Amino acid sequence: MSEQRLAGRKVLITGVGRAIGPAIVRRFAQAGARVVAANRTLSQAQTVVEDVTQQGLSAWALPLDLETPTGAAEAVTAAVDQLGGLDIVVHNAGACPWSRLETLSEEDLELTLSINLKACFRLLKAALPWLRKSEHGRFLATSSVTGPKVAMPGAVHYGAAKAGVNAFVRGAALELAADSITVNAVEPGYIQKPDGFLADPEQRSRIEQYIPLGRLGDPDDIAWAMVYLASDEARYVTGQTIVVDGGALLPESPDLISDVPVAD
């Protein structure tokens, strides 16, 4: 595979504030793409873009509001104005205001559905005229193993939204196949982040003992999967999700982990 396998591709990436988002921006730019990085907190997007442009790569920062019905279309329009078109949309933005079902507020439910699921519809619908003009039309989403594969207390709304993302991927892929536009997603497992409970060494160690590969995922592990799905090498892949979780879903019982040799 060519190091410049996304050379010249015009890309909009949402949700670039931390961990997975910045990694996707960097890897796409390094693969030759021209990237618009859109984020709710613009200063975070600007920090990511500054890091990328200092490497001589092409990236621009944009504000993003996916909580309103018009925010996605506004982001697409701004990206097209900056890039002169659009080949690839990567919807990485997500939200999970933790709450048990019995205490889940209507506001938190709507926020979770809007950013994780509804934004897929809104972004792809707005981008369709441009993706149809492209010879490399792609729509990619960051889903999760939570919802499609497993459940977590306090994340019923998030899991339902991500399961919906996977259904969206399959349906949209079928509808758009005639336009040669592929639609796919990546399902991350536990990925290292700079904050949150996984940043705690004790919590990290506790989780890692249940992962066959013996470590949390790196944001680049997700970014590389996205680069593949965006590339010509994946031109015959559509309607699929790739699980990137270090094998965490494989054992029938956590007790079986001890029988799996882990490389140093």
Image: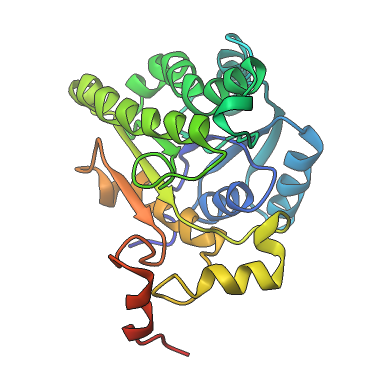
Q: x%, y% of residue 250?
A: 30, 64
At x 45%, y 19%, the residue is 127
Quarter of the N terminus within the rendering: bottom left
Residue 67 lies, with reference to residue 6, above or below; the image says above
In the image, 187: left or right of 215?
left
Q: Of residues 197 and 105, which is closer to you in this image? A: 105
Q: Nearer the viewer, residue 7 or 121?
A: 121
Q: Residue furthest top?
A: 70
Residue at the front extreme, as displayed: 102
Q: Is residue 161 visible?
A: yes
Residue 208 located left or right of residue 147: right
Asked if residue 37 lies left or right of residue 214, the reply is right
Q: Quick one: 151 or 69, which is closer to the camera?
A: 151
Measuring from the top left, give residue 240's x and y in whole percent.
26, 41
Q: Position of residue 174 (x, y in %)?
A: 20, 24
Residue 117 lies left or right of residue 178; in this view the side is right
Q: Is residue 131 above or below residue 262?
A: above
Q: Residue furthest bottom?
A: 264
